[in-house]
Image (cartoon, rainbow, N blue to C red):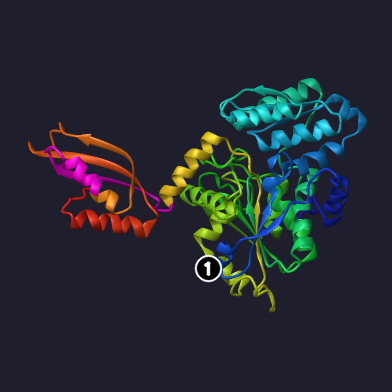
Amino acid sequence: MAARPVRLDDVRRAQRTLAGVAQRTALEPSRHLSRLVGAPVRLKCENLQRTGSFKVRGAYVRIAGLSAGERAAGVVAASTGNHGQGVALAASLLGVRATVFMPEEAQLPKLAATRGYGAQVRVCGQGLDEALAAAREYARAAGAVFIHPFDHPDVIAGQGTVGLEILEQCPRAGTVVMGVGGGGLVAGVAVAVKALRPDVRIVGVQAAGAAAYPPSLAAGHPVTVEAPVTMAEHPGGAAGELTFRIVEELVDEVRTVSEDELSSALLLCLERAKLVVEPAGASPVAALLADPAAFRDAAGGTGEGGEAGGGREGRPVVAVLSGGNVDALVLQRVLRHGMAAAGRYLSLRLLLTDRPGALAALLEVLSAAGANVVDVSHVRTDPRLGLTEAEVEVHLETAGPEHCAAVRAALRAAGYPVMS
């Protein structure tokens, strides 16, 4: 195997470079997740980092390492948001001109924030791959330095400073779980943590619709996922050459989560932890929610107090919330999706006798059951219906799965046939 491209000393140098630049983000306990997993769970809040994600760490270390001539030529990047903001701020702090290519699908707040940090933003392409190609071509033509979002030793080392902070803040950590895009964060954290504490389990998490690492690890080389589809920000569904080598060597497991699990995790972060987290940033929480036993087996213990014992038993699970940059409209849609996934929305189609007052009587039953009616659709003219029948579709807000079952039971008891 070729020499690993990043070592602990590189991460320590990056930490010194970032002194006074990157914030030492909080490590917050989560009682709810601790009860669920059966071991202490801590949330590493990189969503509260400058620019709203960990990306500024790697970007600053990369640009700070450029020669005077390279800095004078400027830097260029491609991003759907977080990497671009990190490059823009880092370049501004170092007095370097930055140009960031962003695809047409990029969220407007991320475009505005990238410009606000001082970068020139060029919008082009239908996706990140096209923006990346345009950025590389611009770098060649202008002689600027291309700042890769994850696949460069300096970027990986900068992201690895998250791992150093975790061990400083939580010396007895037993498992560290974080989202994986191209792999810069998980690779850097793995380098730092495994060098100092090889017994700590490192788990990466990817959205199933853009999961390049599981097939890459199975194949033994980077594999690209064609047309990745997920609500989570992703780097084109690809594993990096350098990051893949580190992940293959040092990361214990890469898991996948569904869109329902991502949206439920985002909702939990907002309601329980009072933290705004973007879908990709919530992926480690999604993994804990989807399979708490997998982390219980790794960590052992029974709650906040049990941090003693051998191996990883009773030691905390640290979940890295990697970013909090989410557009308000996207947040609204994701929260609605998360509420549906958590059983907080109920949609039903029912048959009524088509007579005056029938709909009002139905609404009285729903009100008595404590369901909040969001929307009602009343159909009388469908040829599938009898002359005296009407179909009603109702969308309800509920308190959860048990309440949904109670609402259905109340409708059945009142004699309403529920079609779906």
Residue at 67% x, 25% y: name it: 134
Q: Residue 209, position in %: x, y?
A: 51, 45
Q: Residue furthest right?
A: 68
Left or right position of 206 against 112: left
- Magenta-colored span: 342-364
Examine the rendered structure and indicate whether residue 154 appears above or below residue 136.
Answer: below
Left or right position of 118 against 257: right
Examine the rendered structure and indicate whether residue 318 appears above or below residue 59.
Answer: below
The quadrant of the picture occupied by the N terminus is bottom right
Q: Residue 205, position in %: x, y?
A: 59, 53
Q: Nearer the viewer, residue 406 or 20?
A: 406
Q: Does residue 251 appear in the picture of this structure?
A: yes
Judge whether residue 100 is colored magenta.
no
Residue marked by disc 1? 293
The amino acid type of the residue labelled 1 equals Ala
Examine the rendered structure and indicate whether residue 270 appears above or below residue 113.
Answer: below
